[in-house]
Image: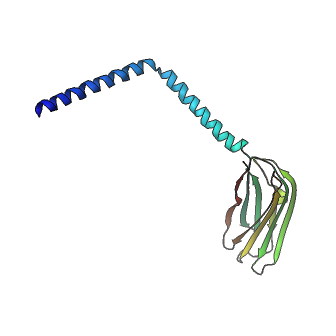
Amino acid sequence: MDEFDEELEQELHEFSQEIGQKIIEISEKIHPVRVAIAGLVMLLILGAIAASWYWVIPRDDVEIEVKYLQRNGHIVLTEIVNDGSREITNVQFKVEFVDKNNEVIDFFEVNLDSIPSHSSVSGDEMELVIQGYTVWEEYSIEVSIKWTNFKGVENVEKFIHYVSDAQTAVFTDECEEVNWFL
């Protein structure tokens, strides 16, 4: 039994020596600059894949950001974000500030011909400033949007956000799921 163990140990030692020698030979053939270049090429390939997802593959991705502030009244700021890779058209956007009795206190409506891909729209015409109403009551902000994607499909979404004792609130509404057009 001892002889067998010694032979096995000797074979393992020789095998490990052979593997060590092969590793030395390979490391002499592969220069560190080659490894760095291969890593850089791999990074470029991964970047190209990510860019094609974000910029090239047709997709529809619309979000609405609503910011509510209580100051000397109520302030509602909104922004439409087209994070998709294609423009959206025929955009109809409406925001209503509603009291607890479902009476519309104030509203605005914006119609846009189009919103280019990877861009957003906001501004004075998409803001509400409501004064003369108590900040102690419960109110809701009702947001509705209608748009046509690049395939001609009409989309409609509606969101309701309740604000009462919140002095500041931020809402991000995802319009449907991201629609891939492959």
Give the x, y percent position of residue 15. 28, 26
- Taking the spot 70% from the left edge, 72% from the top edge, the residue there is 162
Task: Report the coloring of the rendering.
Answer: rainbow
Asked if one can make out residue 85 in the rendered structure from this viewpoint, the answer is: yes
On screen, residue 74 above or below 113: below
**Do we see residue 72 in this rendering?**
no
x and y, in percent, of residue 87 in the image: 80, 49
Q: Nearer the viewer, residue 21 or 54?
A: 21
Q: How many marks?
A: 0
Report the quarter where the N terminus lies: top left
Q: Place residue 7 in its image quadrant.
A: top left
Image location of residue 75, percent across then percent down:
76, 65
- Answer left or right for 108 relative to 68: right
Residue 27 left/right relative to 88? left
Whether 55 is drawn above or below 180: the answer is above
- In the rendering, at what x and y percent does residue 34 appear? 51, 22
Residue, far left:
2
Residue at the (23%, 27%) spot, across then down: 11
At 44% from the left edge and 18% from the top edge, which residue is drawn?
29
Locate residue 145: give its quadrant: bottom right
| Image-based side of 46 in relation to 127, left or right | left
- Name the one closer to the observer, 17 or 138: 17
Residue 138, above or below 171: below
Residue at left offset 81%, top offset 65%: 128
